[in-house]
Image (cartoon, rainbow, N blue to C red):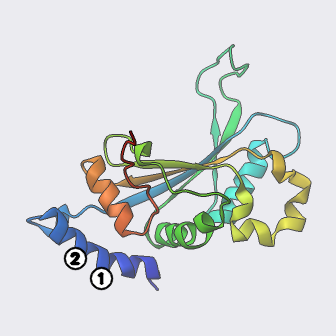
Amino acid sequence: MTSRYRLFYDTVVRSDLLSKLQCKNVHQIPAVSEVNLSIATRIRPSGPNNPIPAALILELLTGQQAKLTRVKRSNAMYKVRAGVLEGAKVSLHGDQMYNFMDRLVTTVLPRITDFEGLRRNSFDGRGNFTMGIKDWSFFLEVESQHENLQTFGLQDAPGLGINVVTTARTDDEARLLLSALRFPITAVRSKQN
């Protein structure tokens, strides 16, 4: 069964972008190709700042098994050695991706205190969007497992990085796509004299 966000993209957003971007071919319409979630941690013997609880949190949020990441090169400034566990990541595609974006836009972002919208300068120049969420407790999945996760001490938890990869060629196309998908991107502020 396809997600409602996927149906929204197929029925409303694609036709809207086709007319706004004046594409000659329907395959030129930008789309979201994948969503990457990652948590970078410091090695601690216990608590949330360890890659194992971070991987469990990512599995809880996405419903997909997280992959543990390792440090590639030693760095004395950060006191890390090559091959040491660094964090966890998950790549979402298809319906899981659309379900996660639906939950992010409709439930998580509105629950953030003093949320003013997503920054316009968070695009990378090639149509990909990156954002971070400092507090995991805004996700309903984490809130429902609060008693089980209390041993991890979520108040000291590292943030969650979310990268939305699109097929858009420019940042303006990607901004138009994500705005059509109801991502609350802030408007351009006019300079006050």
Name the disc covering residue 11, or none.
Answer: 1
Residue at (75, 34) in percent of width and height: 42
Could you tell me residue 177's position as x and y percent?
Answer: 32, 62
Cβ atoms at labels 2 and 1 below 8 Å apart? yes
Please name whichever residue, 16 or 3, is drawn nearer the observer in this view of the structure.
Answer: 16
Q: Crowdedness of circle 1 by 10 Å Cα count: few (<14), some, many (20+)?
A: few
Q: Among all residues in the image, which is located at the extreme top?
A: 76
How many numbered callouts? 2
Kind of residue indicated by mark 1: Thr
Q: Among all residues in the image, which is located at the extreme bottom?
A: 1
Position above or below: 1 against 162: below
Position above or below: 117 against 104: above
Q: Is residue 151 left or right of residue 19?
A: right
- Looking at the rendering, which quadrant does residue 15 occupy? bottom left
The answer to whether any part of residue 68 appears in the image is yes
Circle 2 residue = 15
Residue at (67, 46) in percent of width and height: 159
